[in-house]
Amino acid sequence: MAKFPFYHQHDQMDCGPTCLRMIAAHYGKRFSLEELREKSHFTRGGVSLLGISEAASNLGFRTLGVYVGFEELKTKAPLPCIVYWNQQHFVVVYDIKTIKGEDYVYVADPGAGALKYTKEEFCHSWLSTRKDGADVGIALLLEPMPDFYDQKDVEKKKLVDSLSSFHI
């Protein structure tokens, strides 16, 4: 597995836009945190899952916010995806592996770093409700569409713009 791109959040309210930034980088596009904050309707209280979804759609992702159980997340969800963590934070799940019969979940937490959890540890912080008799958690599934790849990398564009003001 290739190394997953990681960014630290600038403050505790930046987790949602930072998660989206990591996923965009995973698919080969670099966007500034400022642009992603703006697109996700960032406020002093942070962002909502809906705001992250709208920003992702604006970038060219197809998105779907779902309640999903662990087995569905492991077997059917496109990874990486964003999950709602401890009812107050967003993190990226970028891989789930079974090693010697034990499931491990690989998480990019913009506040804490790249982490590996057992299934039990992960589910303890992620599962938030019961639906149709099953424990489920919230996930934002993302799939890049052709429009995503047509976007210009904002970070690169801004660097070129700022360098163009220098004369030799």
Image: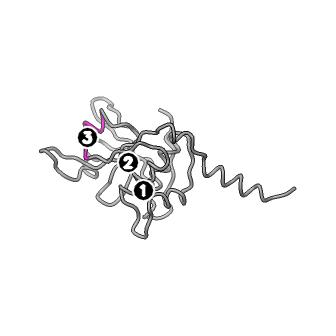
Determine the secondary structure under disc 1: helix
Q: Nearer the viewer, mark 3 or mark 2?
A: 2
Q: Sequence order check: which comes first, mark 2 or mark 1?
A: 1
Determine the secondary structure under disc 2: strand
Percent of width and height locating residue 34: 54, 60
Give the residues drawn in magenta, as a range: 67-75
Q: Disc 3 marks which residue? A: 70
Marks 2 & 1, CB-CB < 8 Å contact: yes
Q: Amino acid at mark 1?
A: Gly
Q: Where's the C terminus, which quadrant?
A: bottom right
Q: Disc 1 marks which residue? A: 16
Q: Residues within 10 Å of mark 1 (few under 14, many from 20)?
A: many
Q: Main secondary structure of the magenta part?
A: helix
Q: Quadrant of residue 133?
A: top left
Q: Is residue 32 magenta?
A: no
Marks 3 & 2, CB-CB < 8 Å contact: no
Tell me the CA gap for discs 2 and 1: 8 Å
Tell me the CA gap for discs 3 and 2: 14 Å
Tell me the CA gap for discs 3 and 1: 21 Å
Q: Sequence order check: which comes first, mark 3 or mark 2?
A: 3
Q: Residues within 10 Å of mark 3 (few under 14, many from 20)?
A: some
